[in-house]
Amino acid sequence: MKKNRLLTALALFFCSAPSFANISNLTAGQCQAMIGKGVMSTKAPVQCDRLRNVTFKHYTFNGKTATGKLVVLDAVASHVERIFDELYQQGFPIALAKPIEYYAGNDNKSMDANNTSAFNYRPIVGKSSLSLHAYGAAIDINPLQNPFVEFTSWGTATFKPLKGHEYSNRMLQRLGKEDRKGFAEEVINIFAQNGFIYWGGYWDTPIDFQHFQTSRDMAYLMTAMPTKEASLFFNHYVDWVQSCQQNYGSKQMNKFKDYTSYLQTELKTTTSLNRLYKANPNAVMQAINKKAHVSQSRCFK
């Protein structure tokens, strides 16, 4: 009996463990402010009804507690909530986190302020195609400590924000110097375990140390789906990532196949899931609802 009471007490403790983040719908006033500042448009692939606020507590670099807010796609919101809950519990510092309308959608101004942000209806830097920020499926964290770095053909590097060059050395601990804090390298696994396995620090050029995202096909797929189906897909995707890591470790992530690849194999197609869903949504949903069989060959190349 004592053992049963102890197990019950432990279960209640963990179930009632405090959360330091919460999710809410966008208000009409917030949506209008986003439109007025050029952050939202009727042309955007995701409209305000499909976006969510994730409000969270975080530590600043001087050790104080502050409140931040990100705007993300509804399907990923619960996992973004979990990411920032874990960052707070681990004491990971975040300088500032305000929705991008505070900077009139100007990504450079947001980076200069060392602002952590998510949704912004804008193209990829230097290109015409939309950034995954326009889908609410990308997060930029501590831009000063994790700058965007571009290289010219003759090897010159430019940093955004400019002071980000002070963090070009990515070692967390250096002889005779204070330990670095707020580096994205410290939290790659937290983002990955919650579905954001694609990090801009893996890229060759540009290198976007601040940037975490889903895959582009996933963003397209989730915005084509209604909220319930998109959330179901992303939850299963996160379960897939976590199952692969728990069974076979996280050191093989450079060879990770991804849940979308698994679903394509199950559906016996090389067509993107987004296109396939638009052509045959029932087939895609049947594959998603079917229990996934995790194995080393299915998880890794």
Image (cartoon, rainbow, N blue to C red):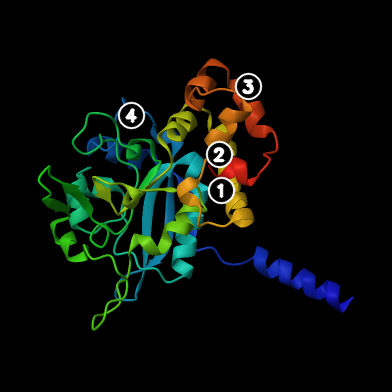
Q: Are marks 2 and 1 in contact (CB under 8 Å)?
A: yes
Question: Disc 2 on helix, strand or loop?
Answer: helix
Q: What amino acid type should be assigned to the residue bearing mark 4?
A: Ala
Residue 290 location, quadrant = top right
Q: Which residue is mark 2?
A: 259
Q: Which residue was labeled with disc 1?
A: 241
Q: CA distance from mark 4 to mark 1?
A: 29 Å
Front of the two marks 1 and 3: 1
Badge 1 amino acid: Val
**Quick check: 166 left or right of 210?**
left
**Nearest to viewer (mark 4 / mark 1):** 1
Neighbourhood count class around disc 1 (C-alpha, 10 Å): few under 14, some 14–19, many 20 upward: many
What residue type is disc 3 on? Ala
Label 4's element?
A: loop
How far apart are the alpha carbons under marks 4 and 3? Answer: 27 Å
Name the residue furthest bottom.
176
Judge from the rendering whether residue 47 lies leftward or rightward of residue 257; answer left or right: left
Q: Which residue is mark 4?
A: 44
**Mark sitting earlier along the chain (4/2):** 4
Determine the residue positioned at 26% across, 49% down. 207
Q: Residue at x 42, y 55 (%)?
A: 55
Q: Are marks 3 and 2 in contact (CB under 8 Å)?
A: no
Mark 1 / mark 3, whichever is N-terminal: 1
Label 3 sits on residue: 283
State which quadrant residue 165 falls in.
bottom left
